[in-house]
Image (cartoon, rainbow, N blue to C red):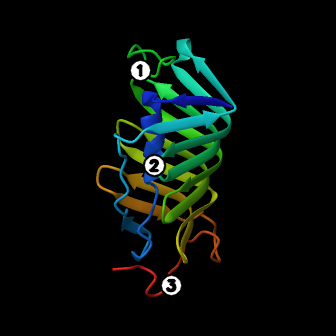
Amino acid sequence: MRRIEGMKLAAAALALLVAGPALAQSGANSTMSGLKLDNKQPIQIESDKLEVQQEQNLAIFTGNVNVVQGTTLMKAGKMTVYYVKGAGSAATGSANIDHLEVDDKVYIKTETQVATGDKGTFDMKSQVFTLSGQKVVLSEGTNVLVGCKLTVQMNTGLAQVDGCGGSGGSSGRVMMSITPDSQKP
């Protein structure tokens, strides 16, 4: 397993970890809890393979991708980092990142929250994170929120969960289960 520590691209990968919801909010729109990137904590990325395609401005981590910063963990089968053309070297991590994508069973865990989905994207310019899939599940203790797409405006913390677009029944709706008194003051 390859270990890559301290690469600038890792900071962007951790931006995905902002997906922890404030599940006590009602409705499909809410403000995210106070999770923030801590640029002072070291970031570690592990994967079975790293392929840098300098000409295409790509870095592709595949196989059991783990990204850790402090107590926050992200797992996926694949993470692709897209760099801005002509803005440094993808091989050394000194390039500016345009956006990144994670695929194949995305799992994000903080001390109190877990988010899962099939794939995720993070756009560096717009600061928008999206987690999507057949079923996106956000949980904090016994509180659970289920939909098919989570979109987080990281500048404002505004989050929106969309249903699956099914017709009729509850298949296209957002589902939230809240346990009273589960949020500590």
Q: Determine which of the numbered discs, if any, sits on residue 179 in the image.
A: 3
Amino acid type for the residue under numbered disc 2: Gly
Q: How many marks?
A: 3
Residue, far bottom: 180
The x and y percentages for residue 167 are 63, 69
The x and y percentages for residue 24 are 41, 76
Instruction: Kindly identify which residue carries mark 2.
Output: 70
Amino acid type for the residue under numbered disc 1: Ala
Mark 3 crowdedness (10 Å alpha carbons): few <14, some 14-19, many ≥20? few
Q: Looking at the picture, does residue 164 appear above or below residue 130?
A: below
Instruction: Kindly identify which residue carries mark 1.
Output: 95
Amino acid type for the residue under numbered disc 3: Thr
The x and y percentages for residue 1 are 69, 31
Mark 2–mark 1 Cα distance, whole angstroms, equals 24 Å
Name the residue: 56% across, 65% down: 147
- What is the quadrant of residue 170 in the picture? bottom right
Name the residue: 39% across, 42% down: 41
* Kind of element beneath mark 1: loop
Q: Earlier in the sequence, mark 2 or mark 3?
A: 2
